[in-house]
Each structure stands twice: as structure tokens, then as C-alpha cells.
Image: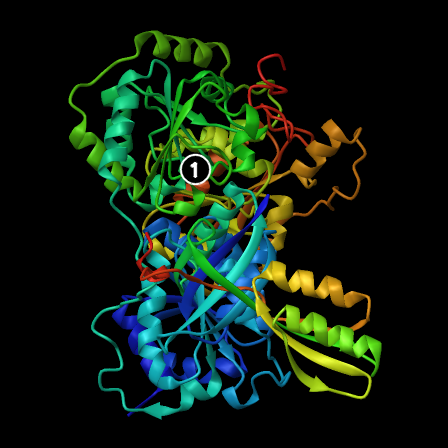
Amino acid sequence: MKTGAKILIEGLKREGVDIIFGYPGGAVLPIYDELYDNPSIRHILVRHEQAAAHAADGYARASGRVGVCLATSGPGACNLVTGIATAYMDSIPIVALTGQVPTTMLGNDAFQEADITGITLPITKHNYLVKKTAELGRIIGQAFHIAKTGRPGPVLIDLPKDVCTTQVDDRDIFPKEVSIRSYQPTYKGHTKQVLKAIEMIGKAERPIIYAGGGIISSGASPELIELAERMGIPVTTTLLGLGGIPCNHPLNLGMLGMHGTEYANYAVTECDLLIAIGVRFDDRVTGKIQTFAPHAAIIHIDVDPAEIGKNKKIDVPIVGDAKNVLQAMLNQIKKSKVNEKWLDQVRTWKKKHPLKYKDDGCLRPQYIIKQLSDLLKGDAIIVSEVGQNQMWTAQYFCFKKPRTWLTSGGLGTMGYGFPAAIGATFAKPGEIVFDIAGDGSFQMNIQELGTVAQHKVPVKVAILNNMYLGMVRQWQELFYDRRYSYTELTPLDFAKIAAAYGIDGIKVESCDNVVPALKTAIETDGPFIIDFRIEREENVFPMVPAGAAINEMIGGHEA
Amino acid sequence: MKSHTLSIVVENKAGVLSRVAGLFSRRGFNIESLAVGTCEEPQMSRMTIVVIGDDAQVEQVQKQLNKLIDVIKVSDITENETVNRELALIKVNAEPGTSRSEVMQIASIFRAQIIDVGSKTVVLEVTGDSEKIDALEKLLRQYGIKELVRTGKIAVLRGAKTVQSLK
């Protein structure tokens, strides 16, 4: 006989979980009591449950494994919501465990009761309210299976307190294998469709690959690069696809879309074949959807059939795992090809319209990120917050490997970066983890300095401090006649705040001090905070105004 | 825009209906009717949902439904040969005298049963396809309908074929 809490911990171990990000409370006391006896599962005590969810997400993105977070019922569970939604939008496998009032009190508006399965219905891949301890073994197996297979995503398990304290016969409580009759993701692409895609690639004169987060989650980066090289196809990636192809690869065009490179956006607009892999034609990528890749036939490879044809009509849909489908394609491709004329055209665009910023000795964020990129040479995990800091990083940091770039793409969650970076340090011990933040975003989860201090998390934070909510200010400047309505922030000395937590930090106000400060951060064993006082009204360019076609950029080469 | 009939087999578990209904509202799909009940397998339920939209929207509805873990099978049976039925209970004013006999006459033309008679009203039970029920409702309006309850459409494929066997 074993209690539910014991079964839970055993189940987590069976799934290979060795770390949980969490926050205790009344309803999860039985679980915490069990954790006390199980040091093989490390528990990282965060300062706010939102950070637990983001840390689990950062852990998952950096490692490719399932991240786990734990919170108590009611407010604890509700505080996970933003983190779960973030993981859902970016298809990140996490399992969220929440406490719940005892089953006998469910639905009674009991103390710290919230209907968290109801609340998270639209933001989880699936969720469970466990009603009987005997079901727990099966549910844990299913939850992890669902989280990491097919199109990955968050799964929540709601655990009433009595389910955790009740003892049941634990023989055969964990089924040998997970079987869910209604859930069988398709991994292998349809052979006929694969051949059709190859034929189209063979015939195309101006092909482009548009690669996204699916490349990272399926581990398809080598196949992507091989396809591009063998068939001479330039590659542009989404925000979440960065790192799928090394930034310095000759066929790489960087990011496309609203703040993409001009050459990527021109190439997509002019291409005659768009090979979309692990992407979802998000509005920040496509701009005005009718004018996105207007001359192209489109091949779309995705593990989620619902993404195919959702926003754009597709000529060759292929449902399957990106790696699996690309391997099948590579096996079938008989001869390689170079589209010299097209590659020349792309090279010309690249040369003529590079990413540019003013190099006038003022402390500009692009300069800082370039220096950091040069120092780290792609050998680090870079995390960002959301807004200008995120776009500058996407544009100017040279990502060389998958899973080295963690950012909240779909939901655009300010406050994601710092806790996600904390999670990443546990996924990849020994690697340098840098959170590139804005002063606004950093303050959204600044309380996690406490977590960093307590667990001596060796995370580095570069705050691009402009004392504005910079991206919103930029839109107000460009589209609202410079009416800066509530986007200015109080100046703060972040190094001093860090010092209060016993964390080292420094303020940097000039270009000369950028590299030394970054070096100090890199060489410091523990955490380090740099407060960069950047040009306050620096903008992210180029930019496609909302609803415009992606080749209608402002602030590009003319600026 | 036209109406499509979806036949959906789901796990017979708590919360499945809210998962399905929630998906419709959150993605802005219009449900015209939804009927749900147990089916030939005790662990499963069958839903018949009539949804209005163009073909692309309805295809997206089906794909999204298929993503729900508790949904076992989704079929658009609009183009198949089906038998469709809906049941309605209609409480209509029928004062003794002319109006009552007229109501009863209309009921008999529509093969509706009178299942309750009050001093001023009668309750009719009618089954048929949705159009038939619409037609009866329209005729009874002039007498004053006090209450109308419709089950929503249920449908089954004609012949030996089953929704489970459809591709």
C-alpha cells in the first residue's frame, strides 16, 4: 500500500524527472513531505509560481526533456497560468502539477479552490483532475507521453489533497506502456506527398525554406541543413527556428517577418516555391497573409495536421515529424542542384540590405549584443524577455546550434526570460546562460533574484535599460504621434538591487565598458547582472507595420 | 456558408463536453445544435453537432476536434446518405373549442403525438428532420407557443456503414 504522494514521486522518477520548480502550499503539503525524503528529485524553490512554469519551460527548451513545475491549489495554480500558456503557444513539453482541495470539497468554493482544469482547458494540450489515487499511475504516464510526443505541449495534473494522502494497493499501478486509443500522432510523411514535394523542389527556380520551432523540437537541424545544401535552397527561420541553421551559414537568411531581415522578406516575396517546415504562418511572420509569398507554390511539413491550411492555402501538405519527413526526402533525392541565378539574387539582396544600426559611439543595444555574440561565439544559451530586447537579440546574436535560444514567441510573455534562464542553467550545467532583458520585462519577475541567490544559480543578465517599455514606446513613436502614454519607467539601479540579494552587478554607461563588463560576467562563477544604460529611443528596424506586406518595411536601408 | 453535420465519437468521461464546447466558442465556430448521449460502446459517447461555416472553417473545426485527446473520431457526414431526426416538445395554447381542434388536426398531419393536455394548453411531441419541425413550429405560432424544446439533430448513416468505419 502506498499513498498517492508516494506514487506521484515514484511516477516522476520513472519518467526520469530529477528536478522540479515549485512553491509549496496547503494543498500540496503531502507532496512536499514526500519530496523531503527524496533528494534524488531536486526541488528549486522559486519566488512566484509563474517563474516555476517558465523555469520548467526554459529547462525543457534547453534540454529537449519534459520540464516539471509544482504549485499549490487556487492562487498557486492560477499563478502558473501565464507560464502554461507560454509553453502552449510555443509547443513546449512541460508537466504542471497542481494541488487541489480534497475531492469531498470540490465545487464548494473551498479555501484556495480554483477550477484549474477548467481555467487551463484552452492552454494545455491536455489536463487531468485526478479523482482516485488508483488512477494516478496511469495518468502520470499519459501526461508525460502526451507532453512530449506529437506536437509537444503542456499537460496539467490537478491533485486533490486526499488523492495524495489515500493509500492504495500499488501493485501494477504503473501500466507497462501508455496506450491512448484516441491519440496517435503521425510521424511518417505520406510517401506520395514526399515524392511530390521532391519533384516540386527539383523544378523550382527560386525556392526558399521557411523553418520554425518544429525543426528545433524534432531535432531536424542536420536534415534541414543537408536539404538546403544539396538543393541549393536559402533558409529563413522564424523567431523560434533560430539556431536551426548556423547564422553564418552561407544559405542562412536570418529571421523573416515583422522584424526580419530585408533580404529574407524579399526572398520570400519573390520565391516560386516555399518549403515551410515546422511553422504555423503566424501573423508576425506573414504580415498581410494575402501578399505572403504571393508567387509561390507551398509545401508545408508539420506534425500537427490542424496547422496545415489554417492560415494559408497549401499545395503539398505533409503531416509528419520534421526530422522523419526530411530524412525521407533526403533518401529519395537523386541528384543535387544549385539555383545559381537565384542564389546570386539572394546574395545581392543580402549585400545591399544588411541589418544596420548607427555606430556613433553612443551605447546602442545592437552593439552590446554583437559584442556578446563575438565573445560567446554561439557557445552559450541565450534567453530573452519580450519586446525590443528580444528582437535585437534575434537580429544580432549569431546562433549556431539548436536549443541555444529560448524566447517566448507565440504568447510574447514579458517576464519569461529570467526564470526560463534559471531553468536552462539546470538543464545544461556548466554552460553559460545569458538572459538579455529590458528594464520593463526584468521587473516582471525580478523577485527571482531570490531564487538565484538561494540556489546560487549562475545566470547572467544583461539588462538593456532604456527606462521605457521600449517596443510599445516605439509603436507610439511611429504610429501614435509620439504620444508616450504610460510607457516611461522610473530609473532603477539594478546593480544595487542585485547587491541587496548578494548578487554581483555593474552599471555600464559607455561603449568602452561593454566588453569588459561582459567579460567579467562570463568569467564570474556565479550570477551576474549588468545594467546597460542604452540610448533611450533606439528602435528595432527594419519593421513591417502591422497588416502590411512583408516587403513593405520601414526603417530599413534608407534609415 | 452552409450547415455541416459532424458525428463525433468521444470518450465517455467527465469534462469532455466542456472541452468540445469550449473549443467551438474559443475558436469562433458557430454551433447550430449539439446532441450528445451514450452509444453502442459503454465507454464512449456520440455527439452530433451541426456547425455553420464554409468548407475551410469546417475542416479546421474537425482538425481541432481531432486534437482533443478525448475525441476518438470526427466525421463530417453532411455529404453521406444519412437518416436525420430531431425531437421537439411543443407546449401550445389550445383553448377548448376551435383552436384546440385545429391544433390537434395540425398535429395529426405532422404525426405529432399529444402527450399532455391541460385546461388551456396541449403538449405535442414530434420527431422528424429539422425542416419538418420548423414547419410545424411555424404553423403553431399563430396559436401561441408557450414553450418549445428541441433536442438538436441526431444522425446515423444509412446502410451497413458506420461512422467508425468512414475514412
Q: Residues within 10 Å of mark 1 (few under 14, many from 20)?
A: few
Question: At which x and y percent is residue B111?
Answer: 61, 72
Identify the residue shown where x is 39% and y is 11%: A347
Can residue A445 be seen from the camera position used here? no
Identify the residue shown where x is 24% and y is 42%: A324
Question: At which x and y percent is residue A149?
Answer: 32, 56
Q: Nearer the viewer, residue A172 or B56?
A: B56
Q: Is residue B15 left or right of residue B99?
A: left
Question: At which x and y percent is residue A99?
Answer: 49, 78
Q: Nearer the viewer, residue B98 or A142?
A: B98
Looking at the rendering, which quadrant does residue A206 occupy? top left
Residue under pointer 1: A519
Looking at the rendering, which quadrant does residue B100 occupy? bottom right
Identify the residue shown where x is 57% and y is 14%: A557
Question: At which x and y percent is residue A179?
Answer: 27, 67
Looking at the rendering, which quadrant does residue A545 occupy? top right
- Name the image quarter holding the C terminus of chain A: top right
Note whether B116 is above or below B105 in the view shown. Answer: below
Q: Nearer the viewer, residue A200 or A115?
A: A200
Q: Nearer the viewer, residue A548 or B144?
A: B144
Numbered label tally = 1
Check the residue under mark 1 and report the chain it is in. A
Note whether A313 is above or below A59 in the view shown. Answer: above
Coloration mode = rainbow
Note whether A174 is above or below A104 in the view shown. Answer: above
- Name the image quarter holding the N terminus of chain A: bottom left
Identify the residue shown where x is 26% and y is 41%: A189
Q: Is residue A112 left or right of residue B58?
A: right
Query: Tag 1: residue type?
Result: Lys
Note whether A520 is above or below B113 in the view shown. Answer: above
For the residue labelled by badge 1, is the local secondary structure a helix, a strand or a loop? helix
